[in-house]
């Protein structure tokens, strides 16, 4: 994955749209914001935008397209959201039906694309502070879990908060809380650490999305609200069609992570 | 105004809805978030929500009602947005037509209420840091100006950024930048200080909204994005009807200011 770390977002998007990259994007284009995707038809767009507004820790918006536009103009003027993500998931009436690498043939004229900030953004400053990121060390996808923390409902949209988990020492957890607090636009501070059962996670070794990672002796799991939350919400709220990125396979934008830092 | 400083938001809202308070709310219910209001019909709601999402410094949303609901459930469950603000302004096709103290008879079933964070929230911590707030000292409304900084367009909504201004020493401006950076949910850090002409303000003694305040020798004007921006936008974008608060006459919520601080 190292060769992609210093590559420009626009070049990576070309490799992705041409099918040369089709897997997780963690660690790519270091310093640039990656985003989760949710595409909905216009009839659901206000409710979903309201859902994001009411659940900013899970759904921090970094861009929303105009109705019918597949170009995320604010964060990547030359991108095409239908081709520039390695893998997409199609949900029909809340049921995951297929995984594809291109959604051009699925696009409809009244669709709206929501780009949602991703915890990858704060991983760079965590690494720079000397805090190890296990799923990067183990070269796999970050583990994600459905919790028993309900999102605030908006119109037809409701469902549980999904969290991403990074194991670390207590000392690192304190520093990580400070660092991620600087990024309220990409999930912000953790929402929980320690006992997973307190937020409804029964088995930490079995994530609902992504891959399990090693939790070493003396480490605690630290949980951040995760942009996969809209996928869990889609399953429960059953819009006729919803398109998302596949877990870990994000949109790589031209936005610098530092732009999302408040301090 | 002092007697209102320690009064609970719910009691103040009662005084307001019964007509016993009909002026600016600065300094009332210290420590509780006050909000700007913009009410639109459903047909404009997605575009306006998108406008707020794209212009978070001017339009930081603290609550949005469901379509048809006049209760801002997230920030004041027992409130009625039609009666609980001292003064409202009605705009028809972008033209300010009347100022009223109750909008019950104007409410329509497909209206959506947007509550937008207000700079009053960060005035408490500024005061606590020993930074004088001139318009509170002079017992008037904060001065607000239209600038030449365009908002990011969303659908039919476009227009200039409106700013609020507080004069202070350079030393205090530095500290004020630190303090307000902790509140990205209510305008955050200043967007300008010093020469007003650089952001298109021709005469600092003639604010477009609110009242002029004294700028003392050695002080510089410091400018924050202001929640009155949607009013300027309404004028330029001409929705058939839009209802806002009157400048300085805000909605007093049950939300504690500290909830909006990221650090």
Image (cartoon, coloured by chain):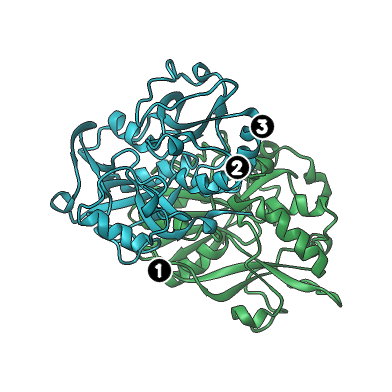
Chain colours: A cyan, B green
Quarter placement of the C terminus of chain A: bottom right
- The residue furthest front is A3
The subunit letter for the residue under badge 2 reads: A
Q: Nearer the viewer, residue B208 or B159?
A: B159
CB within 8 Å, label 3 to label 2: no
Residue B199 falls in which quadrant of the image? bottom right
Task: Name the spot of residue B227 as percent of width and height, x first.
Answer: 58, 59
Say whether mark 2 and mark 3 are on the same chain: yes
Q: Secondary structure at mark 1?
A: loop
Front residue of B201/B191: it is B191
Residue A222 image point, x, y percent: 54, 29
Q: Chain of mark 1?
A: B
Q: Which residue is mark 2?
A: A130
Helix, strand or loop under label 2: loop
The residue to which callout 1 is attached is B238
Secondary structure of the residue carrying tag 3 is helix
Q: Residues within 10 Å of mark 2 (few under 14, many from 20)?
A: few
Circle 1 Cα neighbour tier, 10 Å, few/some/many (<14 / 14–19 / ≥20): some
Q: Is residue B37 visible?
A: yes
Residue located 83% across and 49% down the image: B2
Q: Residue at x 43, y 15 (%)?
A: A202
What residue is pinned by disc 3?
A171
**Does residue B26 appear anywhere in the picture?**
no
Q: Please say if the residues under marks 3 and 1 sit with CB atoms less than 8 Å apart.
A: no
Does B244 sit left or right of B118 as displayed?
Answer: left
Residue A39 shown left or right of residue A163 in the figure? left
CA gap between label 3 and label 2 equals 11 Å
Residue B30 at x, y = what percent?
A: 75, 45
Binning the other alpha carbons within 10 Å of mark 3 as few (below 14), some (14 to 19) or many (20 upward) gives few
Q: Residue B255: which quarter of the image?
A: top right
Q: Nearer the viewer, mark 3 or mark 2?
A: 2
């Amino acid at each position: 994955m190292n060769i992609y770390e210093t590559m420009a977002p626009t070049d990576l998007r070309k490799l992705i749209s041409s099918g040369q990259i089709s897997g997780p994007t963690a660690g790519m284009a270091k310093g640039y914001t990656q985003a989760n995707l949710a595409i909905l038809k216009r009839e659901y767009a206000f409710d979903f935008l309201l859902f994001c507004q009411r659940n900013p820790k899970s759904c921090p918006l970094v861009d929303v397209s105009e109705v019918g536009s597949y170009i995320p103009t604010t964060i990547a003027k030359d991108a095409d959201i239908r081709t520039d993500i390695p893998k997409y998931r199609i949900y029909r009436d809340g049921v995951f039906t297929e995984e594809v690498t291109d959604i051009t043939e699925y696009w409809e004229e009244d669709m709206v694309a929501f780009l949602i900030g991703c915890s990858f953004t704060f991983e760079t400053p965590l690494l720079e502070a000397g805090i190890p990121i296990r799923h990067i060390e183990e070269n796999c996808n970050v583990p994600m879990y459905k919790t028993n923390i309900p999102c605030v409902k908006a119109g037809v949209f409701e469902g549980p908060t999904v969290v991403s988990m990074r194991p670390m020492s207590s000392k690192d957890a304190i520093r990580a809380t400070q660092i991620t607090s600087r990024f309220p636009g990409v999930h912000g501070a953790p929402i929980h650490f320690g006992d997973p059962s307190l937020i409804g996670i029964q088995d930490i070794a079995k994530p609902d999305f992504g891959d399990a990672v090693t939790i070493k002796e003396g480490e605690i799991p630290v949980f951040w609200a995760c942009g996969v939350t809209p996928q869990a919400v889609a399953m429960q709220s059953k819009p006729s069609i919803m398109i998302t990125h596949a877990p870990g396979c994000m949109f790589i934008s031209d936005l610098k992570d530092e732009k999302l830092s408040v301090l």
